[in-house]
Amino acid sequence: MIRVLQSRPLYHGFNQIIFDRLINSSLEEILLYEIGAKRDSFVDNEEITKSVNKKFNYGLIHTVIGITISIILLLTNIFLINQERNNMSEKKDSKITKTASVETKRVIPTVPKEERVQLNEGVKSDKDSKNKK
């Protein structure tokens, strides 16, 4: 595709060497000769540009195909990594549940107020003082 960017030699009318030969010709002959040269140049240039356009389109199609394949590979890779992480977390969870089922069941005890600490240092309410008595 980079070769498409290289310039191609295109035809653009008749050669300047012809000037000396046409100097004694009539104006009509010169104009007809120039028109013929430009017409033939367009025909020849059309073949060159068609060839370059065909190569460009070929390269562009292959670039799009390559990008599409790369995106598919990236998405597949992401999917497989996520799947692997899920499998690893399931294995860890199953190990944890197996060890938890083997352990005995624990009971959380009730702790009386005397063994706990109060966070605020304010005046005690009447309820608290009555409960202590």
Image (cartoon, rainbow, N blue to C red):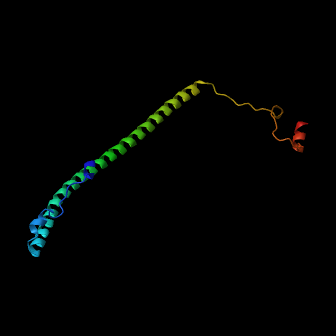
Left or right, 41 with reference to 89 = left
Which of 129/116 is in front?
116
Q: Which percent across, then down, holds residue 42?
A: 16, 64
Residue 1 visible? The answer is no
Which of 112/71 is in front?
71
Residue at position x 58%, y 27% from top? Answer: 100
Residue 103 visible? The answer is yes
Q: Which percent across, then down, holds residue 90?
A: 49, 33
Which of 67/37 is in front?
37
Residue at position x 54%, y 27% from top? Answer: 98
Residue at position x 66%, y 28% from top? Answer: 106
Left or right, 6 with reference to 82 = left
Quadrant position of residue 74 = top left
Quadrant position of residue 16 = bottom left
Q: Which percent across, then down, holds residue 57?
A: 25, 53
Q: Which percent across, then down, holds residue 124?
A: 88, 42
Q: Is residue 3 above or below residue 31?
A: above
Residue at position x 61%, y 24% from top? Answer: 103
Q: In which quadrant of the rendered image does the C terminus lie?
A: top right
Q: In this view, does 115 lie above or below 47?
A: above
Quadrant position of residue 29 = bottom left
Left or right, 68 with reference to 26 = right
Which of 104/125 is in front?
125
Residue found farthest to the right: 133
How many numbered circles are shown? 0
Q: Is residue 83 above or below residue 45?
A: above
